[in-house]
Amino acid sequence: MPNITIDNKHYDLDTLSDEAKAQLASIQFVDSELARLQAQAAALQTARMAYSKALQAALPALTDGDTLKFP
């Protein structure tokens, strides 16, 4: 007899309607996807920072006030 707590109220999952179970499953899916996307965004942000540092290292050194001009 598994239970779930929603808004500080305890519910027996076995007694929920099929509609309530479907909504709960949808919430669990969305929560899982949000967590996956947040982890992916963190990984992409880390990669972006690494690419930015690599770009800075690959650029020619300029003295203050200089501008590199391309033909």
Image (spheres, rainbow, N blue to C red):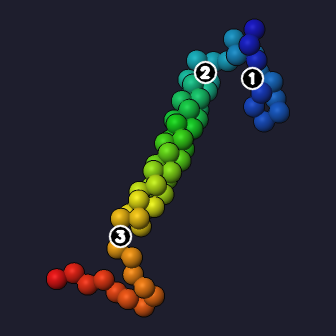
Q: Residues within 10 Å of mark 3 (few under 14, many from 20)?
A: few
Q: Is residue 46 found left or right of 70 in the rendered image?
A: right
What label sits on residue 28 in the rendered view?
none
- 52 left or right of 39 in image: left
Sequence-wise, the earlier of marks 2 and 3 is 2
Q: CA distance from mark 1 to mark 3?
A: 56 Å
**Of pointers 2 and 1, the one earlier in the residue sequence:** 1
Amino acid type, callout 2 = Lys
Q: Earlier in the sequence, mark 1 or mark 3?
A: 1
Instruction: Give the quarter of the figure containing the N terminus.
Output: top right
Q: Which residue is mark 1?
A: 4
In this orientation, which residue lies closer to the viewer: 18 or 33? 33
Crowding at mark 2 (Cα within 10 Å: few <14, some 14-19, many 20+): some
Which residue is the site of mark 3? 59
- Percent position (x, y) of residue 30? 54, 35
The span from disc 2 to disc 1 (Cα, nearest Å) is 11 Å
